[in-house]
Amino acid sequence: MDDQAFLQHRFPALTASALGLACELAGRVQHDRKPGRPFVLGISGAQGSGKSTLAELVAVLLGERHGLATATLSLDDFYLPKSARGELGRTIHPLCATRGVAGTHDPALMAATLDALAAAGPGETTAIPRFDKLSDDRLPRPEWTEITGRPDCILLEGWCVGLRAAYLGPLGSPVNALEAEEDPEGVWTRWSAAQLPAYEAIWDWIDYLLGIRLPDLETVIRSRLRQEQGLVAAGGDSARAMDEQGVRRFVAHYERHTLALWAHFPEVADRLVLRDAAFEYRPFAAS
């Protein structure tokens, strides 16, 4: 049984293109990794692009088929606690309280986690934070995941992985109604852009970056709404889940950053794919 057949057996509901892409990424890790340090595979894409699923597939392949230890870091798990974002909302701008853009994560914690994983000895453990999206808060420390030893591969996935401040260009006028109505003077927009340099040292860890494009922002919204419904189906509190209006407002927070990263994907991603509405992946050719 080859790797793709193995994944098909384990994950029969997934598309062949998703399984094939995971096999390709796992093969890249095996071919390019060097002894003595973890290979860092970055997976970057907007909400609902399949990042977490691809990371899971690659981790299963590397671990169960090829005997390589992996650690998965999701940018979402490094959001600041709700209380810290609330303080930003009071002192900087009300939009800072909403998780999403640069400045609402803890890049220092992420950098420290990467350092700890890369330096871990055989019996040393590294704690990986976890964030609960329905409660919109970081889980308590006892509920974090612990990784023992130094992984062979670190999978780093997130919606803005690879985004740099220079990609935003002149901040200029609002890009959507949210910015026009709630940040007309650009205070929040400028604040968030100024936080990006703290993330860039993290992106420098990445050995290979997969960029995932979606056709348009409407597809992002539909995908994110599907995620919310999935969280509820998995046992989450439906009263805390976002409806379509809530999702549209939420995605608007990311619009400026998402479009900037999409525009620069062709020059920064080692592999660039388009994920369509049917969750099929295919090579993306910039126009």
Image: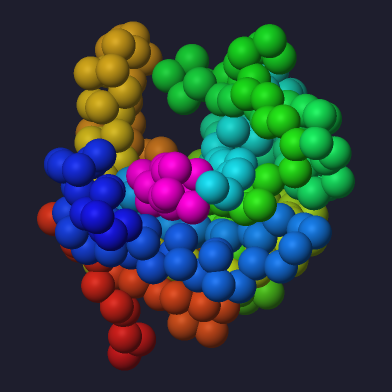
Q: Where is residue 61 in the image (x, y as percent from the top left)?
A: 42, 50
Asked whether residue 85 is in view, the answer is: no
Asked whether residue 57 is in view, the answer is: yes
| Quarter of the view holding residue 99 | top right
Residue shown at 62% from the left, 13% from the top: 143
Residue shown at 37% from the left, 58% from the top: 22
| Quarter of the view holding residue 56 | top left
Q: Where is residue 67 in the image (x, y as percent from the top left)?
A: 54, 47
Q: In this view, does 202 lie to the left or right of 257?
A: right
In which quadrant of the rendered image does the C terminus lie?
bottom left
* Residue toward you, 141 or 27: 27
In the displayed orientation, state which residue is furthest to the bottom. 287
Magenta-tinted stretch: 53-66
Residue shown at 18% from the left, 59% from the top: 16
Q: Where is residue 283 in the image (x, y as percent from the top left)?
A: 29, 78
Is 37 contained in the magenta span?
no
Q: In this view, does 90 lie above or below 182?
A: above
- Magenta: main secondary structure equals helix
